[in-house]
Amino acid sequence: MTELIKFTAAETAAAISKGEVSAVEVAQAHLDRITAVDKKVNAFLHVDTEGALKAARSVDDKRARGEELGPLAGVPLALKDVFTTKGIPTTCGSKMLEGWIPPYDATLTSRLKDAGVVILGKTNMDEFAMGSSTENSAYGPTGNPWDLTRIPGGSGGGSAAALAAYEAPLAIGTDTGGSIRQPGAVTGTVGVKPTYGAVSRYGLVAFSSSLDQGGPCARTVLDAALLHEAIAGYDPLDSTSIDAPVPAVVEAAKMRDIRGMRVGVVKEFAGEGYQAGVMQRFNESVELLRELGAEVVEVSCPSFTLALPAYYLIAPSECSSNLARFDAMRYGLRVGDDGSRSAEQVTALTREAGFGPEVKRRIMLGTYALSSGYYDAYYGSAQKVRTLISRDFDAAFAGVDVLVSPTTPTTAFPIGERADDPMAMYLADLCTIPSNLAGNAAMSLPCGLAPEDNLPVGLQIIAPAMADDRLYRVGGAVEAALNDKWGHSLLEEAPAL
Ligand code: GLN
């Protein structure tokens, strides 16, 4: 049984399709694991035992009838609690949506179900995906399985922790400024932010609509690719969905050959604030890319230094508008509705009680930045910076196939360390945010442990929009070479829970 939780998604699906194990056995092994460790980890906000077993049974029935199973049929998955799930609570880590049961599935949710993926439950996250540590969840922080006193990253810390704790072989995250890649980096797992528009946002509760992107989280590059193919593709229900074929990411993950590829090292992602051990592992990865036959050059993207301030105007502006829908009339929490108060008073009391401090801070920042007297000075300027960042990417990709950088400046920090210092918290996304502003694709994968604290370091690979396959080609080759060198995968070095 314990063996089953260590399988990759690809191995699990193969074992189920060959009849070596049933989907129900696989689901049960993961549900047992959740029961055993999740009190400590707190990766899940809701575990859907019944639904998971039912989905698994239907995969087993399908197989018994001799029907063909998809490449992920019967594989368990942990779903970030920001995607709607029909009949299953969806809270976005907020008190505001406590007890809300969506009447519909997100497109991503229904694609997973159609693929025979077994959804185990919903994972913890920073409230409405705002944060880098999962400490902003209204339901308590998630622990990093490498060291439970440290953060698992955020906002999708629950999804990343579920993978590292072997509670699920696959998970889904959303990346608005780094919330798939940064949790991946600090937990020693793989996380991919697909090209903006590649994965439907229909049923993804909006934080910042022009930046939000759902994507795969896994323990291996191939598993991430299999999940990517299952969730990506055109959706008429999302007006920003890209109507084009999904790049061949699974094929790319299997290539393991990067000879002749041109790789750019982003000069601006180094220096003050970058932990020595992070830079050491990053530099070794660059050396490895050379050994594998890539041509490595240094690239300068001067506007990237302005990405963080631009993001912290654009994301709050969009969030202040998106979160206006939580008015106590439509969903979830309603406070003070005793017949003596006006609708406006009930809305105000509910928003006061339902939103946490970080969400309130961003709504205020965004409302201010969008107000008539300041719109041009703040929001308008930030949009101009966004254009400059896209141009820096265009210039860089004219000369190289992918860019690389550390995913995060530091390894996982202790829970509580940055809780009262928003600026320090925001710096965790220094290297990830440019790709959200430009809409291109990026991956984080483990590249070693920082010698000073023995915690995972992430290598970020960045590709042009709709060239997501390049991430998997480079990521697959690097992962294979590192596993060869170590004799096992990095996660094997995590202390047992
Ligand atoms: N940490 C960033 C923020 O707080 C990114 C969050 C995200 O990607 N959802 O906005």
Image: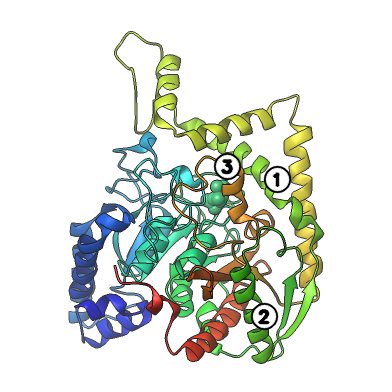
Q: Could you tell me the amino acid type at mark 2?
A: Val
**Toward the viewer: 120 or 126?**
126
**Toward the viewer: 405 or 28?**
405
Q: Which residue is mark 3?
A: 422
Identify the coloring. Answer: rainbow
Quarter of the image with the C terminus in it = bottom left
Q: Is residue 332 above or below residue 421?
A: above
- How far apart are the alpha carbons under marks 3 and 1? 13 Å
* Tag 2–tag 3 contact (CB < 8 Å): no
Res 315 → quadrant: top right
Q: Is residue 339 above or below residue 280?
A: above
Q: Position of residue 321 (x, y in %)?
A: 57, 34
Q: Position of residue 442 (x, y in %)?
A: 60, 67
Q: Residue at x 39, y 18 (%)?
A: 346
**Toward the viewer: 142 or 304?**
142
Label at residue 286: 2
Q: Is residue 495 left or right of residue 215?
A: left
Q: Is residue 470 above or below residue 155?
A: below
Q: Is residue 170 left or right of residue 192?
A: left
Q: Position of residue 167 (x, y in %)?
A: 30, 66
Q: Earlier in the sequence, mark 2 or mark 3?
A: 2
Q: Secondary structure at mark 2?
A: helix
Q: Earlier in the sequence, mark 2 or mark 1?
A: 2
